[in-house]
Amino acid sequence: MTQTGDVSHVLRAPLARAAGWTAAFYLMVLPLMGPRRGLWVALAVLVVQALALAADRVSPASRERLAAALRGSGRFSAWMELRPAWVRTVAPPALLLALAAAGLGMSPYTLDVATNAGIYVLLALGLNIVVGMAGLLVLGYIAFSAVGAYTYAILNTQFHLSFWLALPLGGALAACFGLLLGLPTLRLRGDYLAIVTLGFGEITRITLNNWNSLTNGPNGILGIQPPSLFGFTFSQPKHYFYLLLAMVALAAFFSRRLERSRLGRAWVAMREDETAAESMGVPTLRLKLLAFTLAAFWGGVAGVLFASKQLFVSPESFNFLESVMVLCMVVLGGMGSVPGVILGAVLLAFLPEVLRGVAEYRLIVFGAAMVLLMQYRPQGIWPSSRRYEEFRQEA
Amino acid sequence: MAQALAIQNLTMRFDGLTAVDHVDLSLQDKQIVSLIGPNGAGKTTLFNCVTGHYAPTEGTVHLGRDELLSGLPPHTIAKKGVVRTFQNIRLFPAMSAVENVMVGRHCRTRAGVLGALLGPPSVRREERAIRERARELLAFCGAAAYENQQARNLPYGAQRRLEIARALAAEPRILCLDEPAAGMNPRETAGLIALITAIRGLAITVFLIEHHMNVVMSISDRVAVMDHGVKIAEGTADQVQKDPVVIAAYLGEAVGNRL
């Protein structure tokens, strides 16, 4: 191989850098938008670069200020961490009530989007147990949701199994899959575990796609019955909205409990230093398996809810992008922080709807938003704070 | 006096290198036993074998009279009562000091998933007891002032003490301290000597790796010396200090021969 030479000194020149970014964005959108419309994106990037350069010239501090704004003003963060205990007790039920009341006035479309967001919140809270609390990177998480969804779809269409039985059953079956996957793989660390779980996600989807006799292949399963309770059938978006609201409240409550328990503490310790945790008598392998199984359980439950809402399941709904989406929600919101993860999930579930106006460009906007956030706020929107607890202890 | 720990014929080989070479060592209850030797003598490797981080190539480690430890995973060995600290401090940096110690209580407490989710009174009581005990231990180790600070922000000496408090939280029968005085100033070292003596007062056997000779010589009931993976001497502090083999190991052959 020939030596290409160091080009970094060229990139340091502002103009060269601007040209570089413009070219990079142009190439990125080329396959999506074609050579001509892609030029508009390139132009926009160039203009933004020029503006940034100009702002830098006028006031070199402006860039710092932008970064600081994204990082969050210190005052708000400080208040969040020191907010009085009563805010902490009152806020969650108040928010729940407010949402329940808001549900009465929402249009069916909004209710539907909110219900979908609720399913994502459930998934994100589940994934948060394993990624946020235990610190294990899992990439094929949506597969557990597929297990739950197909459990309900198959058992309901074949044996008329009721939704309320399917809910724990789908979760339990997904948990079994989690256990089976976790037993051989949890000895792997970091990247390797991520790759294995990614493989598991794909295997699950491909199996669902090809096992025609059981899953009806790519055509999916139609004719799933909606849930009903004492003769009342869930038929309108409103009904599902309240069902999901209740489930999310339950999941959030359990997540919080878990986080503050002896197990939650051991997970954090394991995440911080696995060797030290093991030496202090924390059975790390068993705890990883537990986190994995619990996360899979919630994935399964979310899957049952998904199937009961769509009344149709197909392998397409459980592709890799969905796993990535849920992971983004956890990371973006703040790994290990229950309110953060909920916020991340709601934002990412609503964002595509809000961005519908810009149609096919929305993925670009979406990506840009992610890059900016991770650049300036890598801890997430609402990071978990251990400090608040400590201040309360002192008081 | 009863036997606390018996290391028999312990050997640890890494490919061609024999880090620990057929070492026999036994610790009696409530003793402070120090393991000294030049850098690279195999002291920490021996610790790693005792606490389960390495499975020894040959030989055995027994707790008490007949409880086999070698081959078990570290968390099981900790639960059986052999707990360690690390040469390069390994705290949970983002957790507060008291939480670090609370993690040490993990293997002595039981609340599981259902307990965590439902939070019955028994679990709350246990959680309160964990915190209380952790606070006591912080105070015992002289780190009470740092209770709610993140471990990473503690001064160096306090981090060492916190690590000891965390290990004590697991209720060890044998506490293995890997160079606890490393990097400490004379005042901190004096405090550490007092702390280790107090720990023995709790009827805990202390197995100590240390380079500070004033620590080793002032508190050890017995001293074992390793060099190149082999135990070259064992005895009281006085005996070891006068042993020509030990002097040779530390100061070089020529000096040793002249003495």
Image (cartoon, rainbow, N blue to C red):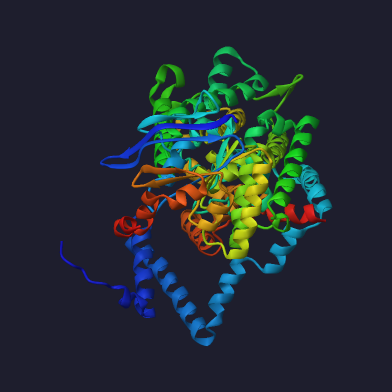
Q: Position of residue A247 (x, y in %)?
A: 69, 34
Q: Is residue A278 above or below residue B61?
A: below
Q: Nearer the viewer, residue A388 or A53?
A: A388
Q: Nearer the viewer, residue A58 or B188?
A: B188
Left or right for B242, reference A114: left
Left or right for A201, reference A173: left
Q: Position of residue A143 (x, y in %)?
A: 48, 32
Which image quadrant: the C terminus of chain A?
bottom right
Whether residue B243 appears in this view of the structure is yes
Q: Nearer the viewer, residue A60 or B138?
A: B138
Q: Position of residue B213 (x, y in %)?
A: 50, 56
Q: Is residue B245 above or below residue B22?
A: below
Residue in the image at 38% along x and 64% along y? A25
Left or right for B144, reference A206: right
Q: Nearer the viewer, residue B125 or A193?
A: B125
Q: Residue furthest left?
A: A1
Residue in the image at 35% along x and 54% along y? B248
Residue in the image at 64% along x and 48% along y? B197
Whether residue A314 appears in this view of the structure is no
Q: Residue furthest front?
A: B259
